Amino acid sequence: MACPFCGLRPLEEFLFRKTVPNVVTGSGNGAAAGTDVTDSASAYAQVYLRVDSAERSVEEWQHVAGCRAWLLVDRNPSTGVVRSVALLGGTQ
Amino acid sequence: MVPGVRYGTRLQDGVVRFTFDGRTYEGRQGDTAASALLANGVVWFGRSVKSRRLRGVMTAGPEEPCALLTVGEYPNVVPNVPATECVLHDGMVLRSQNRWPSLEFDFASLLQWGGGLFTAGFYYKTFFLPGWRAFEPLIRRLAGLGMAPGPAAADSAANRPPLEEHVTCDLLVVGAGPAGLAAARVAARNGLQVVVVEREPAIGGETEFEESVIDSQAAHHWLKAAIASAAARIRQGSRNPRRVPRPEPGSVRVLLQTTAVAIASDSVVAYRERNEPTNFRIHARQVLNAVGAQEQPLVFVGNDLPGVQMLGGAERFAALYGWVPKEPVVLFGNHDRLYASALRLRGQGARVVAIVDTRPFNANSDHLRDEAGADEWRRAACSLLQAVGVECLTGSTVRVACGGRRLRSVEVVAIAGTADTREIRCGSLLMSGGWLPRRALPVGTIVGAAAGCLDLAAAVASGHAGGVAVLQQTGLLAAVAEISATPLATGDPSPRVEPYLRSPCATHEEKRQYLDLQNDVTVADLRVAIAEGFTHIEHAKRYTTLGIGTDQGRWGGHVGAAILADLQGLPSATASTSKDRPPLASVSLQAIAGWRVGDSFRLVRRTPLHDWHVAHGGNPEPMGLWFRPRFYAANGKDAASAAMVEAGRVRQIGGIADCSTLGKLEIAGPDAAAFLDEVYLSRPSTLAVGRSRYAVQLREDGIVLDDGLVLRLAEDRFLATTSSGHGLHVLSHLEHHRAHRASLRVSVADVTDCWAVIAVAGRASADALRTLLGRDPQELSPMAFWDWSGPLQGVGVAGQGGQRLRVLRAGFSGELSFELHCSPALALPLWEALQVGGLEPYGLDALDILRVEKGYLTTSEITGQVTPLDLGMEAMVAKAGPSLGLKLLQRPAFHEPQRPRLVGLRAVDGRSSFLAGAQLTVGPKDRVPMGYVTSSVFSAQLGETVALAFAARDVAPLGARLCARDPLRGRDVQVRVVAPVHFDPAGERLRGRY
Ligand SMILES: [Zn+2]
């Protein structure tokens, strides 16, 4: 996987955390959606609900054995092809 | 043949001595076990797995299904090594497999006399009453492939990890035959960085034995030149896995004895077993597969007899190792290569007596007429051969290979017309049924023989075109034509294969038409499979065991699939073969995981005091990646009695414990306080500088993640401690939250290894520290700390030269206690100074007794399934700010009355003991547990077992009687519910009031 900081690195350096909810249905961008679990209306949905799509999955990964950046990975779970890797939460 | 007079391209000067089944043999340097044993006249290499038939050497490569050896002496044995791949060195110990008591006489082979006993499905049908287990011991004795290695010695090579090397390149070529090297050559000449992996120890593929010419040079010279100039500039690969070596621009790096075995994410994994075992991860922009073609067997009765071999294999033995059969030789096949091979083998000294070619002359086949004059070449070759006494039988087939324990003669019949049977005496039958592409990784383009280009000219042109296509995609194709001109090659003529499936035979003879030599699968077995309904190749494979051996069906898998289709009246040309799965070549488990034992099993973290603990009987035990002393041997003969002594001493006098394994995270920045309020329940923002607080953090779903202390070091700087096993996880959690709160100006750093921690507990702790610091530590109010600078009695000076010391009044024992956080270098002097002051070390088991007596929590209670409400932290939750996890903590299920809650337990009789893990029920007859015991210790202070547990709050109020049930380890014990704090509930000792 290509880390924005470290370039192409072997997969075992990365740690998967979760699939970002509601990306496919488009309720806001994933970076903002994952966090705000203190908002009672969305807390449950944010933690437990997601659209499982065979074509697209936006996920949170950490380059845990590298620069430790948290990443937003947009990939196709059927083929394993990674569409994009962005920094989680924008510029850090 | 006497060793030493053979000539072969792989042979070097020098003799190697080795043993095979206890007998000593001599071979030449460079010999494989197969070539050396053949040269010594050995015919039998092993027996088959199922019906124990004697087997010789069938091939000369990794596809060898018969001649499998166990190499080495127990415990350092490697089973199932193809003799054809086993390069000899002096003193090697080899054994044949699947025979008992000896290769020549095998007990189990007597079973064959039962006649067709081991047909497909035999095990399933025969051993199903009175039950598989009754037969299993006997079958296990007879089954299995070779001998498994035993535990390897600690210092053996088996315990070393393979080297790991990442390689990047523009083009990866798999296979260093003519096609692969033609591709590598043109790519490198035009500036690409090329890596070539080759399974064999030499480049060249079939040009190693086929006289051939490329661009007017001997082919192998041309191929060497194609890579030599570029290869000279390549650095050797680095041993350091972190460095990524990259070839110079326009270069070819050839990795010999290396096999591309799998694809992992976007890189190709190639493995080299020999010399230094190495895993290569090859990151290539483009991949060309030039893996070549696999010669296919022919199916006739007795095609497994020792003496029957693949023609291509025999040619390799002749050219590479100088061995040809001594007995009369018959060639059998369905293409023109037979004639070229016959001429070559004669030149090597073989007595070729006949060629049996399934293709007739003047055939009406369109396929043959297409190539005008092609039959002319064959006619010319025939008359040449016949002139020197080689009989050429065209339009004929070998029906039966005859002989008991080895080949004696073949029975040849004409395919069409009269049933004219000939018997030809011979000791060697070399067969070749054409070629099919070898298995390749499912990536990149296929070129050369693997793409069907079976003659040298076409293969070289195909490889070259593949390289040019790669260049065109990268836009790098040089304008200079001569660099990129297609090489002209000539070798053997195009073989003009005409498919031939199997020779005719009676149905009862089909059980000797072999398709899988390792597992004795025959055409008869396929008939049984079809009759039973296993008509798909994937089903038939599993039912008959076709292709499940170590050769993975490389020898007869394709033919078997074609015959399975043919038996069902389907066109065999369209038959599908079973799915290939990685790894493409056998890789020893050793290389993948076998070395991950002992210290290599996982990383080890040691505290700065580790060596002291070891030297003083501290029994360091693994705890996560850490090692912590469990108890000190001087205090008792076993863990239980030593821990009792140590815990008692802490309660009476005091003690010290190494708590350096606590995770330590520093959180700093203008928004650090606000950030921590979002992740901890206990509002760290309200802490005063120089004070600390017990703090709990939740996951997003309301479950407790971890607990620890938060210290405010400065307005904008905090230190958070975590449980020993949780440091990295909590760090990741904080980093994750920080990523989401990008606007907060805060950073998180792991400082676990920067600080050693010594717990100083008990009434004597104050005196010891007063001596050390020259100041009464009880001036610290509970949970306050000093960043200490100044002289330390007998130790040195803190606050200078990077030697830091922090004195915190807090503890995990319920006593008046302190934590010394110090630079690792200070840990040992402090530890020893405190002992001079009268405090003795206590271990983890004592620590556990002390904390259970006080109802303090560890991961036994914080299990990842409990909420702060379950732990009785309602007050902390009520006071918390808007922190992570609070919203989902409001879910109704967390508030149900039957939800288990932390309680203390004691035996009703005040004597009985009960263990952690015991299940709690209300009545002794209830079958459904309502809770369980999490921790239980014998408290010498209280004279009885005290425990912590989770019990449903509705039926387990204080004072309730429950039953702790532990049917496997103990008896049922009546217990009563008490408060979790068993000892000193008022906390007098914490305040130093003794
Ligand atoms: Zn990175």
Image (tube, rainbow, N blue to C red):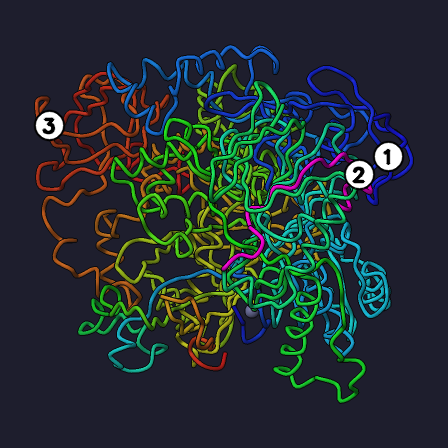
Along the line of sight, which residue is nearer the eye, B806 or A14? A14
The label number, if any, that marks residue B927 in the structure image: 3
Quarter containing the C terminus of chain B: top left
The local crowd at label 3, few if under 14, some if 14 to 19, many if 20 or more residues have their Cα within 10 Å, is few
| Chain on which label 1 sits | B
Tell me where the magenta segment starts and ends, as one range: B343-364
Residue in the picture at 81% in, 82% down: B482
In the rendered image, residues at marks 2 and 3 fall on the same chain: yes
What x and y, as percent, mark residue B904? 24, 34
| B206 displayed left or right of B943 | right
Q: Is residue B191 above or below residue B665?
A: below
Along the line of sight, which residue is nearer the eye, B666 or B965? B965
Disc 3 residue type (three-letter): Arg
| Chain on which label 3 sits | B
Disc 2 residue type (three-letter): Tyr
The label number, if any, that marks residue B321 in the structure image: 2
What x and y, as percent, mark residue B991? 40, 43
Which residue position is annotated with label 1?
B6
